[in-house]
Image: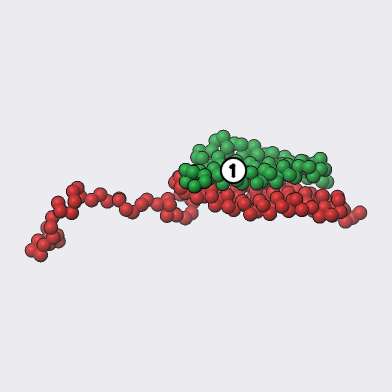
Chain colours: A red, B green
Amino acid sequence: MTLYVILEAIISLLLIAGGTFAFIGSLGMAHLRDFYMRLHGPTKATTLGIGCILIASMGYFGILNGQPVVQDMLITLFLFITAPVSAHLLAKTGLHLQLRYVDKTRGHPVELQDEEVGQTPMSPGGPADRDPVTLDKRPSDR
Amino acid sequence: MLDIALKISLTLVMLALLLNAFRLTVGPSLPDRILALDTMYVNSIALIVLLGLWLGTKTYFEAAVLIAMLGFIGTVAVCKYLLRGDIIE
C-alpha cells in the first residue's frame, strides 16, 4: 500500500513539473523580444515538459494495467527527434528572411552581415576611361 | 493527490496555450507565427494526454500520435516554402 502512495507522489510530481516546464517555455516565447531569443523557449522547455507528462502517463497506465505501455514512448521518441529538426528549419527561415534582432542577441552570423561586394561604387565607364598608370605619372605623385 | 496534480497541470497547459495564441495573433513576423503554431501543437498533445489521464482511457493516444506527425510535417512544409519558395522541388 505504501508503494502505491510513493508511486502516486512520483507521478504527481512529474505531472506538475511537466505543466510548469510547458508554461515556462510558452512564457518565454510570449515575453522575449527577439525571434532568435524566442526560439529557445518552446524548443527546449516545452519539449522537456511534454516528455515529463508523457512519462507520467506511461507510469500511470503501466501501474494500472500491470503491463508496460508502448504508445507514450512512441510519442516521446518522435517529439524528441522532430523538435530539433523543426527548430533548425525555423532558425534557417529567420536567417533567410533577415529578421531584425536586438543588440543583446549574441553572435553575428554571415547571413545577417552586410555584404562586402558592391559596397564601394566603381568609377563610371570601363577600365579604359580611367587614367592610365605609366612610369612618369604615378598615382602617388598626384 | 493525483487529482490535484492533474488540475494544476491542466491549468498550466491551458495558460501556455493562451500565451501561444497571444503570440500567434500578435507575432510581428511570419516565423514567429510558425513557431507559435509549432508550440501550440506540442501543448495540445500534452492536453490530450492529460485528458486521457483524467478520463482513465487510452483512446486518445492515437489522436496524439497523429497530431505529432502532422504538426511536424506542417511546420517543415511551411518553413520549406518560406525558404525556397516551393515545397517539393
Give how far across and how far down residue A62 sits, in percent.
Answer: 82, 52
Q: Indicate the position of residue B38 as horizontal and vertical percent values.
A: 60, 44
For the residue marked with disc 1, what is the amino acid?
Gly
**Closest to the observer, B77 or A22:** B77
**Res. B65 visible in picture:** yes
Tell me which residue sits at (66%, 51%) in the image.
A79
Q: Which residue lies furthest to the bottom in this view?
A: A135
Where residue A24 sits: x, y (%)? 64, 46
Residue under the point 73% across and 44% down: B62
Question: In which image quadrant can residue A137 be found?
Answer: bottom left
Give me the residue at 44% from left, 46% from top.
A98
Q: Where is residue B83 in the image (x, y as percent from the top left)?
A: 48, 46
- Structural crowding at the residue carrying mark 1, measured as other residues with C-alpha within 10 Å and reported as few (<14), some (14–19) or many (≥20): some
- In the picture as drawn, the residue positioned furthest to the front comes out as B89
Q: Is residue A65 left or right of residue A94?
A: right
Left or right, residue A105 beside residue B35: left
Residue name at image x 61 percent, y 39 percent? B20
| Disc 1 target residue | B74
Q: Which secondary structure, mark 1?
A: helix
- On the rendered structure, is A66 left or right of A87? right
| Chain letter, disc 1 residue | B
Residue A36 seen anywhere in this rendered image of the structure: no
